[in-house]
Image (spheres, rainbow, N blue to C red):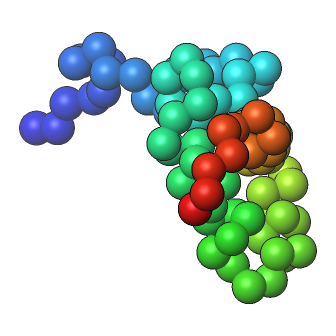
Amino acid sequence: MQSSPEAHNTPTPTTIIVPSSRIIQVGGRLSYADVRLFDLFEDFFDDKASAAAAIAPCPRLTASVAAVKAAAAAWLAERPQTPM
C-alpha cells in the first residue's frame, strides 16, 4: 500500500510558494550557491549568448546572476590594492 504525500504532511512542488521578488537562490543573502550559478552561466559555457538565452525565461535565476555580477564589480572597485 502506497501512502500519499498528504498523509505525511509533506509539501509537494505545487504547494511550495516562493515570492517572485526573491532573487537569492539560497538563504537570505548572496551565497556560494549564487556565485556557482553565476560562474556556470557567465564563465563555464563557451556560447555565452545561448547560456543567457537559456535562463532568460527564469527571472529569479537571471536576477541572481545579475546580483552576483554587480556585487563582484562593487567589491573589485573598492577592494584594497595589493602588490600581487
Q: Quadrant of the C terminus?
A: bottom right
Q: Position of residue 21 (x, y in %)?
A: 78, 20
Closest to the observer, 47 or 16: 47
Most extreme residue toward the front is 83
Q: Position of residue 72 (x, y in %)?
A: 72, 44
The residue located at (70%, 64%) in the rendering is 41
The answer to whether residue 44 is above or below residue 32 is below
Asked if residue 42 can be seen in this view, the reply is: yes
Closest to the observer, 75 or 25: 75
Q: Quadrant of the N terminus?
A: top left
Instruction: Give the quarter of the image for residue 25.
Output: top right
Instruction: Give the quarter of the image for residue 46.
Output: bottom right
The answer to whether residue 49 is above or below residue 14 is below
User: What is the count of numbered marks?
Assistant: 0
42 to the left or right of 49: left
Closest to the observer, 58 or 62: 62
The residue located at (17%, 38%) in the rendering is 2
The residue located at (49%, 23%) in the rendering is 27
41 to the left or right of 21: left
Closest to the observer, 19 or 77: 77
The residue located at (54%, 54%) in the rendering is 36
